[in-house]
Structure formats: C-alpha cells, structure tokens
Image (spheres, rainbow, N blue to C red):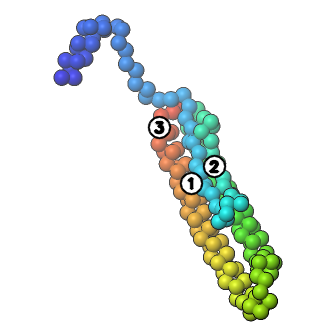
C-alpha cells in the first residue's frame, strides 16, 4: 500500500517536485536546563530555588559540548550546595528566633514558663529534621541533575554535524 501511495505521489506531483529531507545531523545542539527544585517555609514567605543550564546555550562541536557538559555537572553540585546552605541558613534563623516567638505568643503567665523549654526543644528538633530532609532531597536532586546532563550529552552529541 505504501509503495502504491508513493507511486501515486510521484506520478501526480512529478518526480522533481516532492522532495523529502531527513536531517541526519544538526549544526548545533543544546543540553537544556535542569531545575534543582525549591524549598520554602510553610507560609511560603521565602522560597529558595535554582536552575542549572539554559536552553539558549548551543554548541557546534563535540569538544565544546563535552566541556559544557562537564561545566554543567559541576554547576549542579555548586548550585545545589548553595541552595542547601541558603535553606539551612533560613531554617537556622527560624530556630534562633523560637524563644522570642514563644515569648511573644504565649501570654499565660502560669502555663508558659512550665512548657517553654520543652516546646522550644520540640520545635528545634522539628527544624533539625527538616534540615536533614531538605539536605537529602537536594543531594538526590544534585545527582539527578548530573545524570540529566550526562544523558543529554550522550543523546545529543551523535547528532552534531561538526566532528571537531
């Protein structure tokens, strides 16, 4: 059926008017971008996030693309660790202010002094758990980011026209 259809097209359109071009290679390729994700407080009064790479970065040779891949893989770690540090700082600032926050919101003079220390300790433990969860999550995102750019390099580099 396919041969009949093609023969019909050639007969109807003429052999010189219907040309189909299949691209075997591209003059430049991009490795794209990878969002590291975001972390925020419950009220979303602060949100910390970052992205590695850009869809507007194009490269024309295998060596340029490989250098860029290596740069992006290192950037995954650098930016990921910067985000971890920024989130940890925000959470530690919150932890440092727990005593003042408790004193401002707990106004019962009989009960507040009795529960102050245990309440603050509980909240500090919750923040420490949040820091641990956040670090684990971003460390896995860093690994996924690096894998993404390695995969994109392996996928896109065979399609470059220039071979260095």
Choose between 92 and 70: the one closer to the eye: 92
Crowding at dot 3, Cα within 10 Å, few <14 / some 14-19 / many 20+, comes out as: some
**Front label number (1 vs 3):** 1
Choose between 48 and 27: the one closer to the eye: 48
Pointer 1 or 3: first along the chain: 1
Disc 1, disc 2: CB below 8 Å? yes
Q: Secondary structure at mark 2?
A: strand
Pointer 1 or 2: first along the chain: 2
Counting from the top left corner in percent of width and height, residue 117 is at 74, 88
Counting from the top left corner in percent of width and height, residue 116 is at 75, 87
Q: State the mark number for residue 10.
A: none
Gap in Å between the C-alphas at discs 1 and 3?
A: 21 Å
Residue beneath the point at 18% across and 23% down: 1
Gap in Å between the C-alphas at discs 1 and 2?
A: 8 Å
Pointer 3 or 2: first along the chain: 2
Viewer can see residue 101: yes
Viewer can see residue 164: no
Q: Secondary structure at mark 1?
A: helix
Kindly identify which residue carries mark 2: 52
Name the side, left or right, on which 149 lies relative to 49.
left
Crowding at dot 2, Cα within 10 Å, few <14 / some 14-19 / many 20+, comes out as: many
In the rendered image, the vertical position of residue 124 relative to residue 17, given as above or below: below
Counting from the top left corner in percent of width and height, residue 7 is at 22, 14
Kindly identify which residue carries mark 1: 145
Residue beneath the point at 59% across and 71% down: 133
Kindly identify which residue carries mark 3: 158
Counting from the top left corner in percent of width and height, residue 33 is at 59, 45
Residue beneath the point at 74% across and 91% down: 111
Gap in Å between the C-alphas at discs 3 and 2?
A: 23 Å
Residue beneath the point at 56% across and 31% down: 28
Q: Secondary structure at mark 3?
A: helix
Residue 90 placement: quadrant:
bottom right
């Amino acid at each position: 059926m396919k041969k009949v259809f093609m023969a019909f097209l050639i007969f109807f359109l003429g052999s010189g008017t219907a040309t189909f071009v299949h691209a075997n290679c591209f003059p430049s390729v991009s490795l794209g971008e990878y969002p590291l994700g975001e972390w925020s407080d419950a009220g979303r009064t602060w949100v910390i996030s970052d992205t590695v790479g850009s869809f507007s970065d194009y490269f024309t040779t295998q060596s340029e693309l490989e250098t860029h891949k290596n740069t992006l893989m290192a950037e995954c770690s650098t930016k990921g660790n910067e985000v971890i540090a920024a989130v940890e700082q925000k959470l530690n600032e919150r932890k440092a202010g727990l005593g003042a926050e408790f004193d401002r919101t707990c106004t019962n003079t009989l009960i507040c002094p009795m529960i102050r220390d245990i309440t603050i300790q509980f909240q500090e433990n919750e923040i420490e758990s949040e820091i641990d969860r956040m670090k684990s999550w971003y460390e896995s995102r860093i690994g996924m980011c690096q894998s993404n750019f390695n995969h994109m390099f392996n996928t896109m580099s065979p399609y470059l026209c220039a071979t260095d």
